Amino acid sequence: MKGIEIAERGKQQLAELTGLAPGTVSAMSHDEEGWHVAVDMIELRKVPPSTDVLAVYEALLNDQGELLTYKRMRRYRRDQITEEAG
């Protein structure tokens, strides 16, 4: 599978398992374990939308796009801007 297909499969499977609305794929990498896909998911919608609570979930998929594991990495409000060291 191509990277874009893996990313879409990760989003779909996370949405099905968690019941949350997926946002953007914020990171993706491949190593000996498989494909690591980080997806921003909307955990709680609020008014105004800038205060929605989001979370970054990391999914591990095999080369066929099957979900092996996932975990929530961090939570944040939509209006929080953070710079991550790279």
Image (spheres, helix red, strand yellow):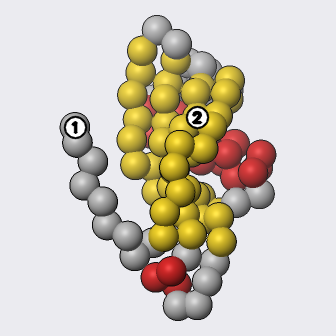
Q: Position of residue 38 (x, y in %)?
A: 48, 42
Identify which residue is drawn at 63% across, 37% down: 71
Identify which residue is drawn at 27% across, 48% down: 84
Asked if residue 86 lies left or right of residue 51, the reply is left
Q: Residue furthest bottom?
A: 48
Q: Position of residue 64 (x, y in %)?
A: 61, 21
Asked if residue 78 lies left or right of residue 82, the reply is right
Q: Residue furthest top?
A: 32
The label shown at residue 59 is 2
Image position of 13 with respect to 33: above or below: below
Q: Earlier in the sequence, mark 2 or mark 1?
A: 2
Distance from the alpha carbon under mark 2 to that under mark 1: 20 Å
Residue 12 visible in the displayed image? yes
Identify which residue is drawn at 54% across, 38% down: 58
Q: Position of residue 50 (x, y in %)?
A: 46, 82
Q: Nearer the viewer, residue 1 or 50?
A: 50
Instruction: Nearest to the eye among marks 2 and 1: give it.
Output: 1
Residue 23 visible in the displayed image? no
> Residue 52: which quarter of the image?
bottom right
Image position of 68 with respect to 70: above or below: above
Identify which residue is drawn at 58% across, 90% down: 47
Image position of 35 with respect to 4: above or below: above
Q: Amino acid at mark 1?
A: Gly
